[in-house]
Amino acid sequence: MKLKKGFVLRVVGGESVVVPVGELSKTFHGMINLNETGAFLWKFFTEEHTVEEGVVALCAEYDVSPEQAEKDVRKFVETLQANGFAE
């Protein structure tokens, strides 16, 4: 899975937000607020990776069990795909 191009992650006032840029800003009017792990996964999935690779990366970055990491990564990926943010 990989994120679609046309979104950028920025930190505004200490908060991580994703906003559309370029042509995408004509059809997507809003921003996405991410918590710390969401921002980590967003950055991770700017390159092509599997869910399993995301689980390993999340476990390496945070003190989280593999089971919880898998649940979180799958939910994150499902949300991205359901909203058209993934290629």
Image (cartoon, rainbow, N blue to C red):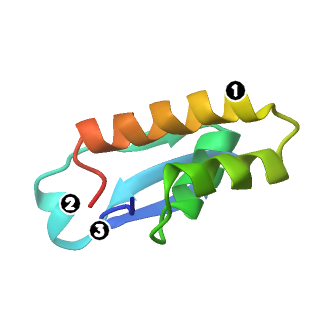
The picture quadrant where one finds residue 10 is bottom right
Dot 1 lies on which element? helix
Residue visible at 72% across and 47% down in the picture = 58
**Badge 3, how many Cα within 10 Å: few under 14, some, many 20+?**
some
The label on residue 25 is 2
Amino acid residing under circle 2: Ser
Residue 37 screen position, x and y as percent = 67, 42
Residue, disc 3: 6
Image quadrant where residue 70 sits: top right
Looking at the picture, does residue 56 appear above or below residue 45? above
Residue 1 visible in the shown view = yes
Say whether residue 74 is left or right of residue 12. Answer: left
Q: Which callout, 2 or 3, points at the residue further toward the start of the chain?
A: 3
- Point out which mark residue 36 bears: none
Q: Nearer the viewer, residue 9 or 54?
A: 54
Amino acid type, label 3 = Gly
**Which residue ends up furthest to the left in the rendered image?**
27
Residues at marks 2 and 3, CA–CA distance in whole angstroms? 8 Å
- Marks 3 and 1, the one that precedes in the sequence: 3
Residue at the (59%, 42%) spot, across then down: 38
Residue designated by label 1 = 68
Which quarter of the rendered picture does the C terminus lie within? bottom left
- Marks 1 and 2, Cα distance to the nearest angstrom? 34 Å
Q: Say if mark 1 contacts mark 2, CB within 8 Å.
A: no
Q: Residues within 10 Å of mark 2 (few under 14, many from 20)?
A: few
Query: Mark 3 to mark 1: distance in Å?
Result: 30 Å
Of callouts 1 and 2, which one flags the residue occurring earlier in the amino acid sequence? 2
Secondary element at image label 3: loop
Indicate the position of residue 27 as horizontal and vertical percent values.
Answer: 11, 53
